[in-house]
Amino acid sequence: MLISGHNSMKVIVLQKGERIMETLKSLAVEKSLRGFFIGIGAVRDPEIGYYDSGRREYLRMKLRGNYEVVGLIGNIVDGPSGPIVHAHISLGGKNGEVLGGHLFEAKTSVTLEIILIPLAGLRRTLDEQTGLLLISEG
Ligand code: ZN
């Protein structure tokens, strides 16, 4: 993992084998990074999810193999017990098909190039209606 930046934006480049969510969580804790991010690259064996609002739970899907990261988008916001990394991903397969959803975890297979736009002052709190930690005022 490499991290650099000028102005206030940060460039984070993950190397082959690094786990996206684990790495971003570590960075959030160790470097106090908060904000919104976008990224492209390639991953293998991603686990994605779809939030079933009726059942108030994620349906989890473990995918096998290599995928293009057509788009990674997410944010890092303070929660009740430390920073929460929330990311969604669009994954491109070898026939051009795209799958996507909430990202639980994926391993970088070639590289993953992320730009983080810092933004402090947001917080996630438990939303009773959905059972999710949502960004709230204050
Ligand atoms: Zn999500």
Image: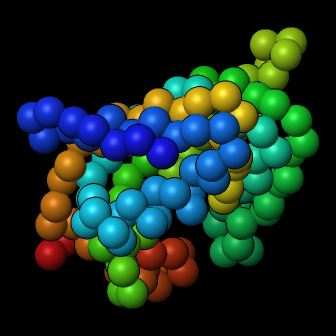
Judging from the image, the colouring scheme is rainbow
Tally the numbered discs: 0
- Residue 109 image point, x, y percent: 72, 34
Q: Nearer the viewer, residue 93 or 114?
A: 114
Residue 50 appears in the picture as rendered: no
Is 13 on the left or on the right of 106, as rendered?
left
State the residue at coordinates (52%, 40%).
14
Which part of the image, by quadrant, shows the C terminus? bottom left
Is 66 on the left or on the right of 54, as rendered?
right
- Residue 7 image point, x, y percent: 9, 34
State the residue at coordinates (72%, 66%).
58
Name, please, the residue furthest toward the left: 7
- Residue 27 image point, x, y percent: 39, 60
Name, please, the residue furthest toward the right: 64
Instruction: Name above or below for residue 10 compared with residue 27.
Output: above
State the residue at coordinates (67%, 75%).
56
Write down the quadrant of residue 13 in the picture.
Answer: top left
Q: Nearer the viewer, residue 43 or 101?
A: 43
Instruction: Name above or below for residue 122 compared with residue 45.
Output: below
Write down the quadrant of residue 76 in the picture.
Answer: bottom left
Is 19 on the left or on the right of 6, as rendered?
right
State the residue at coordinates (56%, 46%).
88
- Residue 124 image point, x, y percent: 34, 74
Residue 114 appears in the picture as rendered: yes
